[in-house]
């Protein structure tokens, strides 16, 4: 009977979305309102929403709700005559937010999700505010084995994406009202700090919080340099946030030890995510709190609802403990290493000596610098008209664009770069 109830809700919204009655971007009722509308339990309505999200009909936005996606297979409502679509679909996407379709075993992941849903008793309750114990244990074991990170499961906090964790973290940083971002292009993170009253500093010296993204450093700091930075941070009473979002793509031999490990977990807050390693739609991230912030978090722990899907947490925990996560990392390292080499060859073929290439973001993206009379922003605008997405980085005499290797198939590099060249 329970299966029939959630399936009825699923079919109801699937039909509404497919027919265009609920257009892309439309917000669905909250899980509680849906439960009241169909006279079912919250768990039943949440299960229906999870299946809709898994099949691509809706997506979850942390602390906002569920929204209809814009999938190509949906039937569009009758178009108004003589009203062409003003935004052509992107054919060549060099953005850093996507992953390669061939990088993930969808069938294997579905089996783990289905296995998690079969845990009926677990599905009948809300998720643990700090994150499911199995997942925190799996993360702690992985970090102990593969990164020099000091942690235990009780210091790990799970959330649906980095932004939701920063929303949780900012109120804990009492007495600090300024922040320095090593990557000033991380607008989403900056927005969260600004929403909490922090001012943005251009230099490390004046900031109360240092937000570091080590994998984006083109010339990574040596271990002595990192130790000096940590010593200075201690002297100034600064908190250090180490966002190691794509750290798995850097081997121990490629980079110095993490700031968190060098600090012993005293004043460094460590952030990680699974978006690049699995799928962007699996919104699971984590932070590791120092002991002093654990004391601040503990009495308020139960006041914050868990934002990450309980089903996906349980699925990921088993996925990791069974060894599939390590195999996924090795697979991605090989795939993206090969694609980086192919992208460099394609750039040389199209641009020759007229372009300079520098790989950043742990080798996942290339900075392409070329001569052009147009600004980087104008090139981006022209590129959109040619169904090509690129990210401008800087514009000082020359134009620099960021090209990710993750989302675009390798056989599309040449036509994409030829289209880009025409935009210059």
Image (cartoon, grey):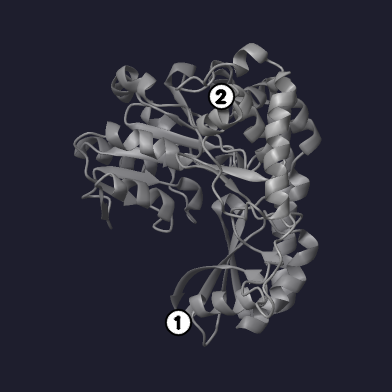
Position of 142 compared to 228: left or right? right
Horizontal placement of 77 versus 275: left or right? right
| Location of residue 209 by image quarter | top left
Residue at image x 47%, y 27%?
306
Report the residue that reaches farthest toward the bottom: 373
Counting from the top left corner in percent of width and height, residue 165 is at: 42, 36
Could you tell me how far apart the alpha carbons at marks 1 and 2 are, in whole angstroms?
Answer: 58 Å
Q: Which circle, 1 or 2, is nearer the viewer?
A: 2
Q: Position of residue 253 (x, y in %)?
A: 58, 40
- Name which of mark 1 and mark 2 comes first in the sequence: 2
Residue 278 can be seen in this image: no
Q: Residue at x 28, y 48 (%)?
A: 179
Q: Position of residue 182 (x, y in %)?
A: 38, 52
Q: Secondary structure at mark 1?
A: loop
Would you identify the image quadrant in which residue 354 lies?
Answer: bottom right
Residue corresponding to mark 1: 397
Residue at (25% x, 35% y) in the render: 234
The reply to whether residue 316 is in sight is yes
Question: Residue at position x 63%, y 44% from top?
Answer: 58
- Work out whether 206 lies above or below 411: above
The residue indicated by pointer 2 is 42
- Front residue of this view, candidates 415 and 265: 415
**Disc 1 packing (10 Å; few <14; some 14–19; many ≥20):** few
| Residue 387: image tag | none
- Please say if 84 is above or below 358: below
Quarter in which the C terminus is drawn: bottom right
Q: Quadrant of the N terminus?
A: top right
Whether tag 1 and tag 2 are in contact, CB under 8 A, the answer is no
């Amino acid at each position: 009977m329970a299966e029939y109830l959630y399936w009825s809700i699923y079919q109801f919204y699937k039909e509404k979305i497919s027919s265009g009655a609920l257009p892309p971007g439309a917000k669905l009722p909250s899980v509680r309102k849906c439960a009241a509308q169909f006279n079912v339990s919250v768990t039943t309505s949440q299960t229906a929403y999870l299946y809709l999200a898994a099949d691509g009909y809706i997506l979850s936005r942390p602390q906002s709700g569920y929204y209809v996606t814009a999938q190509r297979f949906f039937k569009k409502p009758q178009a108004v005559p003589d009203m062409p679509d003003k935004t052509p679909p992107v054919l060549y996407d060099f953005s850093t937010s996507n992953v390669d379709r061939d990088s993930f075993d969808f069938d294997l992941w579905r089996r783990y999700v289905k296995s998690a849903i079969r845990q009926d008793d677990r599905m009948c309750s809300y998720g643990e505010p700090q994150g499911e114990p199995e997942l925190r244990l799996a993360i702690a074991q992985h970090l102990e084995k593969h990164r020099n990170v000091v942690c235990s499961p009780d210091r790990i906090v799970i959330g649906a994406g980095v932004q939701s964790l920063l929303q949780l973290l900012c109120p804990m940083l009492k007495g600090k009202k300024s922040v320095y971002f090593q990557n000033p292009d991380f607008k989403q993170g900056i927005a969260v700090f600004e929403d909490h009253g922090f001012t943005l500093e251009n230099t490390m010296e004046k900031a109360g919080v240092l937000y570091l993204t080590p994998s984006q450093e083109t010339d990574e700091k040596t271990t002595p340099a990192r130790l000096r930075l940590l010593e200075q941070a201690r002297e100034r009473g600064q908190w250090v946030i180490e966002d190691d979002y794509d750290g798995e793509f850097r081997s121990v031999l490629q980079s110095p030890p993490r700031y968190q490990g060098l600090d012993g977990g005293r004043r460094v807050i460590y952030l990680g995510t699974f978006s690049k390693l699995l799928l962007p739609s699996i919104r699971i991230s984590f932070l590791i709190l120092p002991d002093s912030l654990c004391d601040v978090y503990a009495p308020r722990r139960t006041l914050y609802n868990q934002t990450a899907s309980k089903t996906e947490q349980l699925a990921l925990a088993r996925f990791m403990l069974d060894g599939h996560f390590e195999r996924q990392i090795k697979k991605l390292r090989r795939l993206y290493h090969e694609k980086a080499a192919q992208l460099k060859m394609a750039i040389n073929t199209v641009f020759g000596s007229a372009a300079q290439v520098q790989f950043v973001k742990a080798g996942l993206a290339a900075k392409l610098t070329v001569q052009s009379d147009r600004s980087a922003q104008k090139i981006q605008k022209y590129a959109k008209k040619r169904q090509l997405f690129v990210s401008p980085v800087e514009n000082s005499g020359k134009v620099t664009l960021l090209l990710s290797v993750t989302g675009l198939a390798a056989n599309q590099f040449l036509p994409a770069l030829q289209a880009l060249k025409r935009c210059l």
